Amino acid sequence: MRKLSADQKEIHQELGGLSGTVGYTLEDRAYLTLPQLLKQDFGQKFPMRR
């Protein structure tokens, strides 16, 4: 039972790290494409900051 509990904690930590990685990747991609989508869908133009 202790091993099962330890394994569950490890899985929880790994999934938390994976969730963060996926979140940051989506944020990076959105940051690059959002200005183009806003212009296309709403006619709004925003300068890109790098």
Image: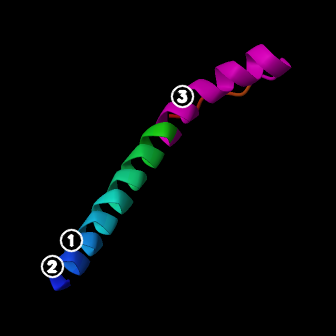
Q: Label 2: state its secondary structure.
A: helix
Three-letter amino acid code at the position of disc 1: Asp
Quadrant of res 2: bottom left
Residue placed most toward the observer, 22 or 2: 2
Q: Is residue 28 left or right of residue 41?
A: left
Residue at numbered disc 3 = 32
Residue at numbered disc 1 = 7
* Mark 1–mark 3 distance (CA, rounded to whole Å): 38 Å
Residue density around tag 1, few if under 14, some if 14–19, many if 20 or more, within 10 Å: few
Q: Label 1: state its secondary structure.
A: helix
Which region is colored magenta? Answer: 27-45
Q: Residue at x 28, y 74 (%)?
A: 9
User: Is the residue 38 above or below the residue 27 in the image?
Assistant: above
Does residue 37 show up magenta in the picture?
yes
Query: Of the residues under marks 2 and 3, which one precedes in the sequence?
Result: 2
Q: Which mark is residue 3?
A: 2
* Mark 1–mark 2 distance (CA, rounded to whole Å): 6 Å
Q: Residue at x 75, y 24 (%)?
A: 38
Marks 2 and 3 in Cβ contact (< 8 Å): no
Residue placed most toward the observer, 37 or 48: 37
